[in-house]
Image (cartoon, rainbow, N blue to C red):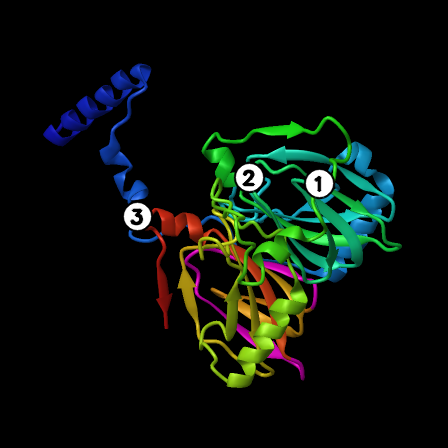
Amino acid sequence: MTVDEIAEGRRQAFYQGIQPLHLSPLWTVLHAVVTREPVVKEVPHLWAWRAVRPYLEEAARLIGTDEAERRVLVLENPGEVPHPAVTQTLYAGLQIILPGEVARTHRHTANALRFIVEGEGAYTTVDGEKTVMRRGDFVTTPIWSWHDHGNSSDQPMVWLDGLDVPLVNRLNGMFGDPFPTEVQPVTKAPDDSWWRWGQSLRPVGDPPPQARRASPIVNYRYTVARAALEALQRQGDLDPWDGIRLEYQNPVTGGPALPTMAAYLQLLPRGFRTASHRHTSGTVYCVVEGRGRTWAGDVEMRWEPNDVFVVPAWMPHRHEVLGDEEAVLFSFDDAPVQRAFGLYREDKE
């Protein structure tokens, strides 16, 4: 037996000896722990509205909101991520609610957002404030807020749910509660938060809500955000990587609307092609208007209205608008968490 073989035998005996003590040698795995770049396990994927919409209808026929509580089809990433999840830190799902239905009141420690994909007239009530939702509206549900949904319209309503559930679960921070009754009492005027905080004004003597870092605004109207995009487009100041991209902000802090998730609305003019870039935040997109395609790495994803797709973290990506119309994309990511810890990076070509 050679000297090297004897040394290796001693090492293996050492490794076996420390196993019962629940110890392991870092030097054997250090290269996999401290990597030169992020090791991303999620993959690019697109959920086509034309394919998904019939299954939402069937789900509505098969199960009621009284049984399901939240009738949602989860968008599960085909890669190696903890399910249910669309990225390592984000959850996404499509929720449908039929006329006359109610999704009962509950609360949880996960932050949540809604982006309305189809319909008009359903409502969400968040901590006593009721807001009627329309296609393209962006609705916030901060941590530990009582919230319920109902549909008093004559048509189904569908929205994209985005939550930080995977992150909260990894931090062992998930708690949830049901409300004593199916529907919480409405204690505020409709869209009260928008009139108090959404106009760059606030009532004198009304202190800012500093108890939490989430925006006090429940519903950011699509009509307002769309008009802002149009006004900026007329100025012709296009970012090479994002076209015209606006972030939904907390009017109190100037930060993201939710402390763990940032949300955006962007406009890509007709025929526009973005330059390629990558960043450490994984991003979920929902197509509001127009048609186009996105390359994420070597994967091409062709999209049209109401499609949802995900671009993994640190993956080069670019967009191109197809056809004769401009495109509008809603998106959300986990950039606020990364920035809070000094982890966020972006690489532009």
Q: How far across and how far down the image is residue 96, in percent?
A: 77, 48
Find disc 3 in the rendering and name its residue. Answer: 35
Q: Amino acid at mark 1?
A: Thr
Residue 266 left/right relative to 289: left
Q: Which residues are magenta?
A: 305-325
Indicate which disc, 2 or 1, sits on the residue closer to the N terminus: 2
Query: Can residue 310 be seen from the camera position used here?
Result: no
Residue 141 left/right relative to 262: right
Distance between the alpha carbons at the discs numbered 2 and 3: 33 Å
Q: Residues within 10 Å of mark 3 (few under 14, many from 20)?
A: few
Q: Residues within 10 Å of mark 2 (few under 14, many from 20)?
A: some
Label number found at residue 125: none
Find disc 2 in the rendering and name its residue. Answer: 143
Question: Which quadrant holds residue 129?
Answer: top right
Find disc 1 in the rendering and name its residue. Answer: 187
| Magenta stretch holds residue 314 | yes
Q: Residue at x 53, y 43 (%)?
A: 164
